[in-house]
Amino acid sequence: MKKADEIEPPDTESPKPSILARRLSQDEVFDDDYLYFNEMYLTRERTRLERELIVKICSPGANATFLDVGCGHGRISNELALGGFKVTGVDMSESAILRARRNAETLSVDVNYIVSDFLSFETRTRYDFVLSWYTSFGYFDDDTNKQILNRMFLKTKPGGACLIEHINRDRMLKNFTEQMFQRRNEDVMLDQIKFDVISSRSTRERTFYRAGKLRSVTYDIRIFTFTELAGWLRSAGFSQIFGYGSEGERFTVDSKRMLILATREK
């Protein structure tokens, strides 16, 4: 039987709109081509260090539960499970979840993977930690993004916390570049980047040239200052907000990444 603080009260609001009608298809942007280029630096060692960083910031107990929102192919979910934690991973991409399950089987870990957009994710379970890692938040309009944070709060146990890892807007603008280029052997991934300072959205036209085939896809994402995202988290119901850089240091303008820990009162 679950403890009372593990059960989310029934929703009293009207049903949330599905976010399946998003501007991008995850299966087109974060597909095999994306993984092919990114696996060059999303190494096992890097993933292990990121798990250690999550543990350092969250200080989870031995039996802590994690909900990984936008878990993708399960890189972090599986690594947390390797650390002995109980993990649920949610992603709206069926192909990503299939890959996550295969990877979990290879690593001999047990993760509860669910194909669902987060606003339609049906469970009354609450978790010690709700996680959004590697810029997996911000792909929708502001109202929907705020609904997602509200939902993350509801899925967090009293006394638990939400951890979001994202782009550091200040550093990004300080070092802004309109093109990013990756090469692997004879294959190329090129990002052409625009940033709208009014909406604070970054748009990328991503072109893949791989195995002699060329294709392009465009997507955009909301970029936040620490202050803005902290305000959104407080509006969602979280209380104390803490900021860290990519190695767990105090967050600054020059931090490579922005990590925000938001706690829920007991």
Image (tube, helix red, strand yellow):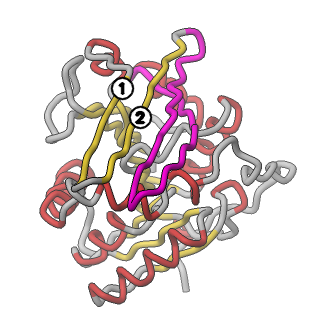
> Mark 2–mark 1 contact, CB under 8 Å?
yes
Q: In terms of sequence position, does the residue under pointer 2 or pointer 1 come before the other? A: 1
Q: Nearer the viewer, residue 56 or 196?
A: 196
Residue 99 image offset from top left, x and y in percent: 45, 76
* Residue pictured at 32% horizontal, 17% vertical: 176
Q: Residue furthest right?
A: 14
- The circle on residue 109 is none
Q: Nearer the viewer, residue 180 or 122?
A: 180
* 17 relative to 109 in the view: left or right: right
Q: Which residue is mark 2?
A: 191
Residue 74 image offset from top left, x and y in percent: 40, 68
Give the vertical position of 34 relative to 250 (above or below): below
Q: Which residue is mark 1?
A: 179
Are there few (<14), some (14-19), or many (20+) residues within 10 Å of tag 1? few
Point out the stretch of residues depicted in magenta: 198-226
Q: Is residue 201 visible?
A: yes
Q: Main secondary structure of the magenta part?
A: strand
Q: Nearer the viewer, residue 110 or 190?
A: 190
* 1 relative to 146 in the view: left or right: left
* Amino acid residing under circle 1: Gln
Give the vertical position of 73 relative to 63 (above or below): above
* 141 relative to 211 in the view: left or right: right
Give the vertical position of 6 relative to 98 (above or below): above
Separation of disc 2 and disc 1 at Cα?
Answer: 5 Å
Specify the quadrant of the image occupied by residue 225.
top left
Specify the quadrant of the image occupied by residue 23.
top right
* Residue pictured at 37% horizontal, 60% vertical: 35
* Amino acid residing under circle 2: Asp
